[in-house]
Image: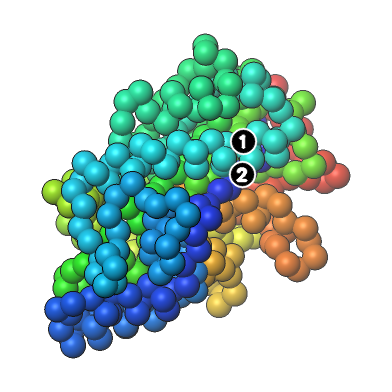
Amino acid sequence: MVTSVLSIGTAVPPTRLAQQDVRDLFIAQPGASRLTQRLIGAAFDASGIESRHTVLAEFSGEVPETPSGIPVVDESGRILSPSTGARNDEYIRQAPPLFAAAADAAIRGAGITPDQLTHVVTVSCTGMFAPGPDYRLVRDLGLPVTVERYHLGFVGCAAALPGLRTAARICAGDPDAVVLVVCAELCTLHFRVSEDPQQIVSSSVFADGAAAAIVSADPSLRGAQWLELERFATAVTDDGEHDMAWTVGDEGFEMVLSAEVPRIIGREIRGAVARFLGDDEVDAWAVHPGGRSVLDRVESGLELPASTLEVSRRILRDYGNMSSATILFILREFLNGTGDGTTPDARRIATLAFGPGLTVESALVTRRTAEAPHAPEAP
């Protein structure tokens, strides 16, 4: 029995930020020293990002038709600092519609109806409430009230792969299961002005977005193309526990993202991948773009050709780091590959994502098409 991703849908908030505009806003903050201004400029310019999306329309520099529910920027251009409670209230208001939009896109992409779903797995680390986003999806999309619901919270940027792994385990136990996996992250809710280089780097890369996947082992539900979920792996690096972390502070969630993270990944990635892949060969790589330097270290650590991570770099460039949702944006490019050179048409794809710990999550997936014959499934 083979479990497959039948479709992937994505959604982003309507406000698109140009990276250089956000950089200039942070540089212009009152009291910023020249050193801080140089650090901000260097971090934003080296990010590999051209644009990203936010639920906080005030960051665009324009007066929005519908203001955010928290203070963001005052009339003088000073970035404000609302409480964690206020930020979380905004998450409760703005996250459910984003969950629903990505989920609806995935459902429509799979050619199924909401009442066919048997399980829901939601993923998020940028806010929390109960009854949570899994419950809201039942109401917002009209899912069966009997649908089984699971939530992976505070797992960080790597969480989409455990989400898919959970769906695969469900399908292994229930061949008739149709599982919706949805990741939604509102990272920009936790904006802050700081002279701390780690906080500056966080401000330069994180963005908002959502992505959803429909997962099933039922071959009758497959469309023109799908991604077979072959296997998963988890590895905890020898160090990094204090270099990538996500904690709750008084003025938003606080990200620890030290300069050691790319170096740790570069040092550990070869061993983690060797244990995961063994002697298997792959045709492409889908790598979570924690930042440009992370991709550079993966590329050099695995001795990959310069063009190998082009899809990951393109998603980073156009959307920034949307935490857990990002790797599904990348896999969507592979799933929808056309073979015309504009999107990848690779067959076997090694998928990597990195989370607090420092943890490496891996998945081996194979892209199939209805026209391409493949080995029969084991009885």
Say what amino acid the circle numbered 1 marks: Asp
Measured from the top left, where is residue 16 in percent x and y? 50, 63
- Report helix, strand or loop for mark 2: strand
Q: Secondary structure at mark 1?
A: helix
Which residue is nearer to you in this view: 264 or 71? 71
Given residues 159 and 4, the one toward you in this image is 159
Residue 144 position in % (x across, y down): 57, 15
Label 1 close to label 2 by CB (< 8 Å):
yes
Instruction: Describe residue 87's horizontal placement relative to residue 217 as left or right.
Output: left
Q: Residue at x 35, y 23 (%)?
A: 131
Check disc 2 and report the residue beneath it.
9
Q: Give residue 151's mark.
A: none
Is 262 on the left or on the right of 243, as rendered?
right
Query: Is residue 301 in sight in this rendering?
Result: no
Q: Residue at x 70, y 36 (%)?
A: 108
Which residue is disc 1 drawn over?
Answer: 104
Whether 159 is drawn above or below 266: the answer is above
N-terminal of the pair, mark 1 or mark 2, is 2
Give the residue at the far top of this rendering.
146
Question: Which image quarter: residue 212?
Answer: top right
- Residues packed near mark 1 inside 10 Å, few (<14), some (14 to 19) or many (20 plus): many
Residue 94, visible in the rendered structure: yes
- Rendered-image quadrant of the N terminus: top right
Query: Which residue is painted at 30% across and 35% down in the image?
Result: 128
Q: Find residue 8 and report its image quarter.
A: top right
Q: Is residue 145 left or right of residue 56?
A: right
Q: Nearer the viewer, mark 1 or mark 2?
A: 1
Quarter residue 206 falls in = bottom left
Q: Residue 214, relative to residue 17: is it above or below?
A: above
Judging depth in this view, the residue of 369 and 207 nearest the camera is 207
Residue plotted at (38% across, 72% down): 22
Residue 238 in percent (x, y) is at 23, 56
